[in-house]
Amino acid sequence: MDFELSEEQKMVIEEAKKFAEKKLAPAAAEFDEKQEVNLAALKELGQLGYLGMTVPEEYGGAALGTVPYVGAMIEFSKADAGTAVGLSVQNSLVNDPLVLFGTEEQKKKFLPKLASGEWLGCFSLTEAGAGSDPGSVRATAVRDGDHFILNGTKNFTTNGSFADVIIGFFSTDREKGSKGISAFLIHKDVPGFAVGKHENKLGIRSSSTTEMVFTDCRIPAGNLLGQENKGLNVALATLDGGRLGIAAQAVGIAEAALDESVRYSKERTQFGKALSEFQGLQFMLADMAVDVEVAKTMLFRAAWMKEAKKRYTKEAAIAKLFASEMSHRVCHKALQIHGGYGFMKEYKVERLYRDQRITEIYEGTSEIHRLVIARSLLSD
């Protein structure tokens, strides 16, 4: 069993680290405070190929694979988890379903612009009454000849405020519930579409989270992604990959919290010696390091499985569940190590603590992941 990354994979991750440290880290606190998206950085990441990491070269992508993608996501998340999730959405929730379910015409039209960052995208499934239960989607798509008419409101859409392309999920047969949902490709310029409420969030405040409002939006039937009434299949397949991106985000946040704790423990003195000299604190650091390494190993294994085109639904759920809850434990310890200073915005662990919390909720809550894992075990 070879755990060694290839030279190309190492280079991709190392360049991501350099970009994160130079372009993201210095501005992260400011964008968090202002609740603004670092769009310039996202666009530059597109030019560098990081917004099309798993898109085939024939459609303008870098075709680098899932393993370097999650490695890069860790590095970006260590610096700015809000910007990192924008990149994750583009790769996992927009590009991936187009590659998997798009027609040749759709791939040629959308993927080159998405992979380059000329267009940015979002994934809009959740509604006020349909979060973990996609069968409760109320937004509708009614066929009208060669078109569909879209109506409804989505919420909690990451990248919503600036997305050029929306992958939206609508009920095309209400009587069938979750088996009557369809996925559509929607451009922001379609008449009747508007960005609604901008959410005021606890963490990842440098990302955009909005409502998406559709009022009699008329789109061509050719914008259907996958088969009609098979949208749930599109969503579930997409979310498997999305969970790897969020697991990587959680690992990156935790790794940053560990780094900050090691540094602080060497600088801070109490009772005449550095905190790092106290055995109790050393044990905390050791437990944090173990947690991070276990999560990272799970993550890269699941990423390898996806890259090898093996079934990885259970492994993705395990990686995301463990990584997100691990990140909670590590950030808790990091803030505790910093004491009162950790509660202050001047210290990075305050932001890391806030950013971590969403990783246990989006792309499926911890409870949903336990259901996915249990069903896989019982079906086996």
Image: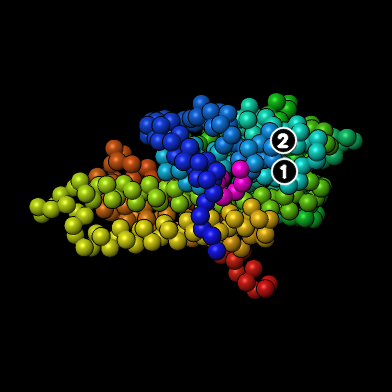
Q: Is residue 303 left or right of residue 100?
A: left
Number of dots carrying numbers? 2
- Place of residue 299 in the rendered image (x, y in percent of width and height, measured from the top left): 52, 56
Q: Which residue is mark 1?
A: 99
Q: Is residue 238 left or right of residue 149?
A: left
Q: Residue at x 24, y 59 (%)?
A: 281
- Distance (Cα) linking label 1 and label 2: 9 Å
Q: Residues within 10 Å of mark 2 (few under 14, many from 20)?
A: many
Q: Quadrant of residue 345?
A: top left
Tell me if residue 155 can be seen.
no
Quick one: SS at disc 2?
helix
Is 67 inside the magenta-drawn segment? Answer: yes
Q: Which residue is mark 2?
A: 59
CB atoms at circles 1 and 2 under 8 Å apart? yes
- Place of residue 258 in the rendered image (x, y in percent of width and height, measured from the top left): 34, 51
Is 66 inside the magenta-drawn segment? Answer: yes
Q: Residues within 10 Å of mark 1 (few under 14, many from 20)?
A: some
Magenta stretch: give its range. 64-70
Q: Residue at x 80, y 40 (%)?
A: 103
Q: Residue at x 72, y 42 (%)?
A: 98
Q: Earlier in the sequence, mark 1 or mark 2?
A: 2
